[in-house]
Amino acid sequence: MTTPAIAVSGLRKGYQDKTVLDGIDLTVPAGSIFALLGPNGAGKTTTVNVLTTLIKADGGTVRVAGHDAATDAKEVRKAIGVTGQFAAVDELLTGRENLRLMADLGPVEAKEGRRIVADLLLRFELTEAADKPASTYSGGMRRKLDLAMTLVGSPKIVFLDEPTTGLDPRSRRTMWSIIRALVADGVTIFLTTQYLEEADQLADRIAVLDGGRIVAQGTAEQLKRQMPGSHVRLRFATAGELDAAARILPEAVGDTESLTLKVPGDSATKSLRELLARLAEHSVDAEELTVHTPDLDDVFLALTGHNTKTEAK
């Protein structure tokens, strides 16, 4: 049986009279992407700080890369890389110099360090800007450089704390491609994010943290299936057709202003066929049909009472 990249059992952490983490259990398989979601103050950053040995837990067990985070912190640090929410680059140095600094700080020979730096600049498409000060980099370039610096030591596990906060959509998708490529190379990613689309696109498994507890855990599809609310939306060309359809479909909720009916149901082909057949029997046609299924925003709102679109920074 393969040893998990991260195994957490009964993790507790508090400050004075406030409990921040109240018995967390997590297992992250090696070579996967695990996303930890939660509103502000849920305990995401505290969790990452414990897993990366920055702070000690009050209780429970934490094993990272097979090592106990409390008793073997040095070995844990050798195996991990951490990219924080804000880029930790030195803006007075060039991109190449930032990477060389990281190589010089690690147990890497000078020749090998130069090779690693050149490879990372190429991999992150920073070669042309390599000898320009980091202060001239765009937000997306700075985040790429920050992640490249994290990879200088070839970590087995990379912690990404909201890696795409503040990036434009194009830069965000570039970062997603880089993250997927890392996992394809066998790296394990532990991701915290407030962008639900990001977790949906990237994560093999997701845990939702709220009030210091894990309130749900599973794949994105498993979490979505827990939520009720699937429906079919029918839009009609005239008020007369809307009224006729409403009589045929008494379970539907109508909106006379938008000329639409919301019919409870799922997206299965059989269900849609039966719905359209009921309308066709009475020679009623919908001008437009759309299917709505719960997304991770719905899951997040139902589980935490928060909407990530208003929570995101």
Image (cartoon, rainbow, N blue to C red):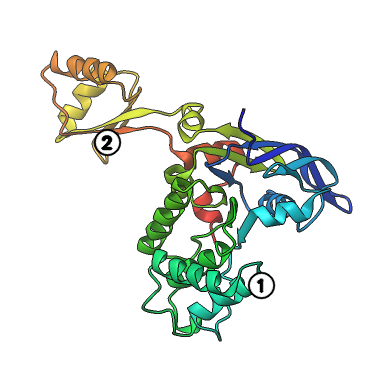
Classify 6 as above or below 125.
above
Q: Residue at x 68, y 56 (%)?
A: 78
* Precedes in sequence: disc 1 or disc 2: 1
Q: Is residue 25 left or right of residue 55?
A: left
Residue assigned mark 1 = 105
Q: Quadrant of the C terminus?
A: bottom right
Secondary structure under the numbered disc 1 in the rendered image: helix
Question: Toward the viewer: 253 or 112?
Answer: 112
Q: Residue at x 23, y 15 (%)?
A: 274
Q: From the image, state whether disc 1 or disc 2 is nearer to you.
A: 1
- Residue 125 is left or right of residue 274, and the answer is right
How far is the residue under mark 1 from the one under mark 2?
67 Å
Q: How many neighbours does mark 2 have within 10 angstroms: few (below 14), some (14-19), or many (20 or more)?
A: few
Q: Is residue 224 left or right of residue 283?
A: right
Q: Nearer the viewer, residue 310 or 122?
A: 122
Q: Is residue 37 above or below residue 166?
A: above
Q: Position of residue 32 (x, y in %)?
A: 52, 41
Residue depicted at 39% across the width and 64% down the height:
171
Name the residue rendered at 82%, 52% in the picture.
56
Given the image, on which type of amino acid does mark 1 rest?
Leu
Return the residue at label 2: 256
Tag 2 secondary structure = loop
Who is closer to the viewer here, 249 or 73?
Answer: 73
Foreground pick, 111 / 288: 111
On screen, residue 69 above or below 312: above
Disc 1 packing (10 Å; few <14; some 14–19; many ≥20): few
In the image, residue 188 lies at what x, y percent?
55, 46
* Residue 18: image location, x then y, percent: 83, 50
Under mark 2, the amino acid is Thr
Q: How far from the left and from the top, in percent, is residue 286?
A: 17, 29
